[in-house]
Image (spheres, rainbow, N blue to C red):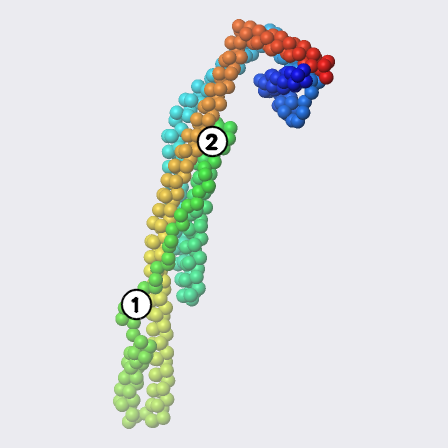
Amino acid sequence: MTVTVDHDELRELNRLVRLGAQANARPDLLARLSAGPFTADQVIRSLQSLQIDLRNRRAGMGDPGRGARLAAEARHAETRLRRFRELSARWPRLLSEAVGTADSDLGYAIQRRVRCLIDEGTALIESRVPRGEFDRWLQCRIAAEVTDGDRALRAAATMIAGRMSATLGLSTVIAPMPQVFGAPTVVAAPWPTPAGRQPLASRLISILMPAYSGIAMSSVLLRDHVPVWLLAAAAIIGAIALGGAALAGDRWRQADRERAEALTRLRSTADALRPALAKQARDGVRAIEQRVHAAVDAAVTEHTGQLAAAAGASQRAAQAQATGQALRDIDADLASIRDLLVRASRLAATQ
């Protein structure tokens, strides 16, 4: 029966010491008394350690300048809380300004990138690249522009969140939730179908017939004055020369027509790409604003609570120092520790 009573008494002492260690911010004592079996000697050593801490704290409270220092800390904590509340009252307007700046920058970047796409495509068309190579280049550039738009939105999200953190003076950076922005589907415009293009045989006939008619008429008029072999040679040479010139002119017109078609296709693709990228930017900015708004709201609420708790603790400490209540509390704790030491020493003597 005595053993059971002593064991219950030891558990009660351990519980009271752990409460004291928690109240005095001693996690080492908590870990020591909570891990595995414990003895009365361990309880005594823990109580002695708490007793030393309280005596040191009481000696520090006797400092004549401590009251003025605590009062100054309380005023400073109250000033910080008031200033942050005044600043945080304007954070929705600050967020709107940051979002507006990002939206303007994204819109300008889209116009500039599409303009560069048109300039580079025009240069390729002027250099007479094959149609297949131009098609591959255009598809790659469209994919690159969509990827650049997504990257620009992520950079805008980081910029807006960092700007809000710096403006509000928060200790932690406001990090918006990971966002996957929707990529627009943009396909290059099809090649325009030319109207009225004649087959190759018809074009050759239309080119060579005028030259053949002129040579035939000249041969009829000059057959009585010029030898036949000379007329035949002149006819052949003239047909070759005039036909070659006509073919060269037709080839140049054909190349110019293909160039115009390629430019038309390039501009049609750019006209389709521009609004698609603009919509991607608008949707992304709207999503960023919603997520950053929620993150800032939570961060401001949390930081305000922390500042209010710090200001309240500083105010209570200053009042306790001014009224002497802190010293009376420490004296009461020391008296309780002395009583617990007596009980623990009695248990240690019976073991």
- Tell me if I can see residue 334 in this picture: no
210 up-or-down from 46: above or below: below
Name the residue at 61% across, 10% down: 336
Q: Which residue is more in the foreground, 232 or 13?
A: 13
Q: Position of residue 46 (x, y in %)?
A: 67, 18
Q: Earlier in the sequence, mark 1 or mark 2?
A: 2
Q: Position of residue 296 (x, y in %)?
A: 43, 31
Name the residue at 44% across, 64% down: 133
Quadrant (top left/top right/bottom left/bottom right) for the C terminus: top right
Give, as a three-letter code, the residue at label 1.
Answer: Pro
278 up-or-down from 223: above or below: above
Residue of label 2? 165
Residue of label 1? 194
Q: Secondary structure at mark 1?
A: loop
Name the residue at 71% across, 18% down: 41
Local crowd size for mark 2, using a 10 Å CA cut-off: few (<14), some (14–19), many (≥20): some
330 up-or-down from 127: above or below: above
Q: Quadrant of residue 168?
A: top left
Q: CA distance from mark 1 to mark 2?
A: 58 Å
Q: Quadrant of residue 88?
A: top left
Q: Position of residue 63 (x, y in %)?
A: 61, 8
Give, as a three-letter code, the residue at label 2.
Answer: Ser
Q: Which residue is more in the foreground, 189 or 127?
A: 189
Q: Secondary structure at mark 2?
A: helix
Apparent side of residue 216 relative to residue 318 in the rendered image (left or right): left
- Contact between marks 1 and 2 (CB within 8 A): the answer is no
Apparent side of residue 280 relative to residue 307 in the rendered image (left or right): left
Quadrant (top left/top right/bottom left/bottom right) for the N terminus: top right
Q: Position of residue 192 (x, y in %)?
A: 32, 64
